[in-house]
Image (cartoon, rainbow, N blue to C red):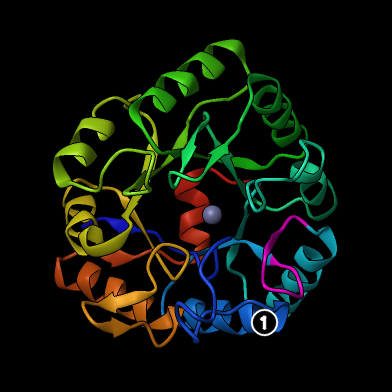
């Protein structure tokens, strides 16, 4: 029986109320959804912020306000994005980390074409800088992998001391411009990482269920939420982020595993005390 960590990613940088009116965008809406998701079994919240027009932003005040509202109510692990706005500068992408000092933050381990529209830039200089910031503030990098080459980047940064073992990976399957969401691709990626690593995965779009089932079978952790999927099932908009967490928790339990609490997740991931 394994303890499996559920991460909830409630907002992301892209989906709008037009895509799904239930997506939380303001600090209060995000905090409410995170609290409900925590009650349903989520141990980690991966957070993005939106400005007052609903666009992705790295505004540190929005992060601070949201984090405060969440911390008042629960002990969920906070995992803050460093990629919430393609136009943000390298400094803006790290400023919130230095103020909030979250337990985790995303580390997008390479650049790619994004959704066939723009470039998702993570330069070598930025990644070295970000890795150092995270070590300085004792923040665990969640190494987001959109394609196989990014794993080899992570191995390079490990050798250089920019990242430290044990590594924690998040496999993002099905983002246009990256690797497709198939079970075969998940197995391929999982077999490339160092054996002492922890890892989590999710699929974007219709493969999110098969990818979750395979992830649990392979001993990984799972991520769910409206950042990745605004549809709960074919033709059915998600009612809330909690709805995804409830389903993931049920599948974990039905498959003979246990849902990790935040404190159990801290132990599994070796987070700061
Ligand atoms: Zn994200």
On the picture, is 165 further left or further right than 172? right
Query: Where on the image, by quarter, is ligand 1?
Result: bottom right
Q: Which residue is denoted by mark 1 in the rendering?
A: 73
Q: Is residue 199 left or right of residue 45?
A: left
Position in image of residue 184 (x %, y %): 14, 39
Q: Is residue 53 magenta?
A: yes
**256 and 19: which is toward the camera:** 19
Q: What residue sits 36% from the left and 33% below the top?
A: 147
What type of secondary structure mainly makes up the magenta span?
loop
Query: Is 85 included in the stretch rendered in magenta?
Result: no
Image position of 197 with respect to 44: above or below = above
In the rendered view, would you say 162 is above or below 205?
above
Q: Residue 172: give x, y in percent of width and height.
A: 38, 46
Q: Quadrant of the N terminus?
A: bottom left
| Residue 128 spot, x, y in % from top left | 68, 22
In this view, 243 is above or below 169 = below
User: Which residue: 41% across, 19% down?
Assistant: 152
Between 144 and 100, the one lying in front of the other is: 144
Residue 100, quarter of the rendered image: bottom right
Q: Is residue 176 left or right of residue 129?
A: left
* SS for dot 1: loop
> Which segment did they paint magenta?
50-58
């Amino acid at each position: 029986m394994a303890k499996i960590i559920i991460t909830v990613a409630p907002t992301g940088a892209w989906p709008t109320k037009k895509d799904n009116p239930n997506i939380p965008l303001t600090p209060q809406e995000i905090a409410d959804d995170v609290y409900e998701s925590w009650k349903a079994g989520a141990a980690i919240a991966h957070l993005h912020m939106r400005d007052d027009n609903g666009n992705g932003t790295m505004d540190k005040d929005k992060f601070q306000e949201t984090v405060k509202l969440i911390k008042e109510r629960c002990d969920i692990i906070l995992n803050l994005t460093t990629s919430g706005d393609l136009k943000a500068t390298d400094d803006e992408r790290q400023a919130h980390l230095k103020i909030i000092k979250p337990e985790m933050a995303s580390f997008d381990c390479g650049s790619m074409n994004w959704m066939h529209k723009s470039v998702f830039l993570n330069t070598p200089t930025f990644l070295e800088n970000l890795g150092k910031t995270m070590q300085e503030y004792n923040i665990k990098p969640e190494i987001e992998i959109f394609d196989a080459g990014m794993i080899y980047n992570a191995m390079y940064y490990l050798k250089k001391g920019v990242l430290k073992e044990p590594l924690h990976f998040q496999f993002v399957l099905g983002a246009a411009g990256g690797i497709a969401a198939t079970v075969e691709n998940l197995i391929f990626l999982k077999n490339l990482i160092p054996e002492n690593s922890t890892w989590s995965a999710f699929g974007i779009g219709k493969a999110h269920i098969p990818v979750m089932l395979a992830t649990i079978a392979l001993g990984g952790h799972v991520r769910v939420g409206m950042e990745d999927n605004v549809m709960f099932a074919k033709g059915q908009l998600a009612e809330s982020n909690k709805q995804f967490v409830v389903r993931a928790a049920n599948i974990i339990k039905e498959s003979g595993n246990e849902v990790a609490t935040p404190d159990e997740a801290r132990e599994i991931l070796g987070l700061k005390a």
